[in-house]
Amino acid sequence: MSIHKNETIKEKINIQENHKIGIFFMLTAAICFALIAALVKQVRHLPLMELVVFRNIPMMVIVSAMIAKEKIPPFGNNKPVLILSGLVITVGTIAGFYAFTALPITDALTIQQLNPLFTFFFAGIFLKEKLHFRQIPFFLLAFLGGLLVIRPGFRVDIFPAIVALVSAISISGSHVTLRHLRLSDHYLVIINYRAYIICLVSLIILILQKGFVIPNPSDYLNLALIGIVVLIAQITLTKAYQYAPASLVSLYNYSQIIFACVFSLLFFREIPDMLSIIGAIFIIVSGYFNYRYKSKNLI
């Protein structure tokens, strides 16, 4: 009886440690995603699809090399979900990049932070993760915060705000596929699939548009940084969902709002208006209470 009890305690400790590691990776990814938004805005004079193509080049080269070095089968095991994950994140990436170029960074990322609301439901429906309906008021608070930022019918740039919302929904779907793939495929294979699919789709659109513009030297530097930071973000994001449930770590995406505010002030002297600030506060408070509730129901 005592041995069984000790094993149960050890198992709980291991789960809690994995959750902490998952949270650390998610926070690192959040910093990277906020930085990506700032870098994209720096080169917003270039065609959107060109930005998306360059975003993936370092990832494709480096991750492919890592896969070859580790002798990992590159085509993966769960091919249908790998392809689905790539297509879903393609929509989220293109929509997100557009929002970064057309909206203040803080607004774009705040709207994107509605994705845990959709992840909460998608994880329950598709992953059969336990849904705690007492969390619903917290998500409603986040939704209210999103409305304050989007302000449907009251802002001139409503279309970019709606596109940012589409990005949030797509990202939540992508997060759920990451959690599903953790049991079947190596995280490098997942990242590689997503990079190649995003690049292929955006390259086809760019060719059809015939809108390629030759970047200047400073643009090349920013484009290279985008690719490198995206690689770090994808690795840490994928690892986060391997260590902890999607319904837990996705909440830490809210920290992107704080990092976005910092980068907006540093690089663009953008100051969010009062409604955006209140909306962001609602979303952050919602994330905090979700964490408090979830931390008491981890096991």
Image (spheres, helix red, strand yellow):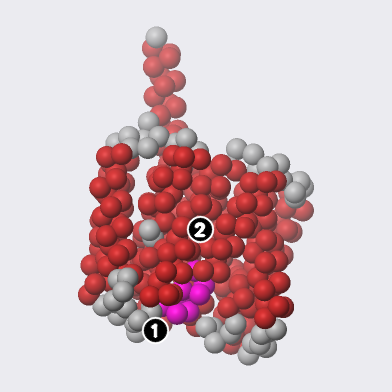
265, 21: nearer the viewer? 265
147, 106: nearer the viewer? 147
In the image, which is nearer the foreground, mark 1 or mark 2?
2
Does the magenta stretch mainly form a helix, a strand or a loop? Answer: helix
The residue beneath circle 2 is 170
Label 2 neighbourhood size at 10 Å, few (<14), some (14-19), many (20+)? Answer: many
Report the magenta residues as a range: 96-103
Q: Is residue 196 above or below residue 133?
A: below
Label 1 neighbourhood size at 10 Å, few (<14), some (14-19), many (20+)? Answer: some
Determine the CA span between mark 1 and mark 2.
27 Å
Q: Earlier in the sequence, mark 1 or mark 2?
A: 2
- Asked if one can make out residue 18 in the rendered structure from this viewpoint, the answer is no
Q: Is residue 98 above or below residue 6?
A: below
Q: Say which residue appears at 56% left-offset and 63% top-offset.
A: 91
Quadrant of image for the C terminus = top left
Q: Is residue 289 above or below residue 165?
A: above
Residue type at the position of mark 2: Ser
Queried whether the magenta region covers residue 227, the answer comes back as no
- Under circle 1, the secondary element is helix
The residue beneath circle 1 is 268
Taking the view exactly as shown, the residue that stands out farthest to the front is 153
Q: Position of residue 276 (x, y in %)?
A: 28, 71
- 295 sits to left or right of 233: left
Q: Say which residue appears at 50% left-offset and 38% top-offset.
A: 127
Quadrant of image for the N terminus = top left
92, 11: nearer the viewer? 92
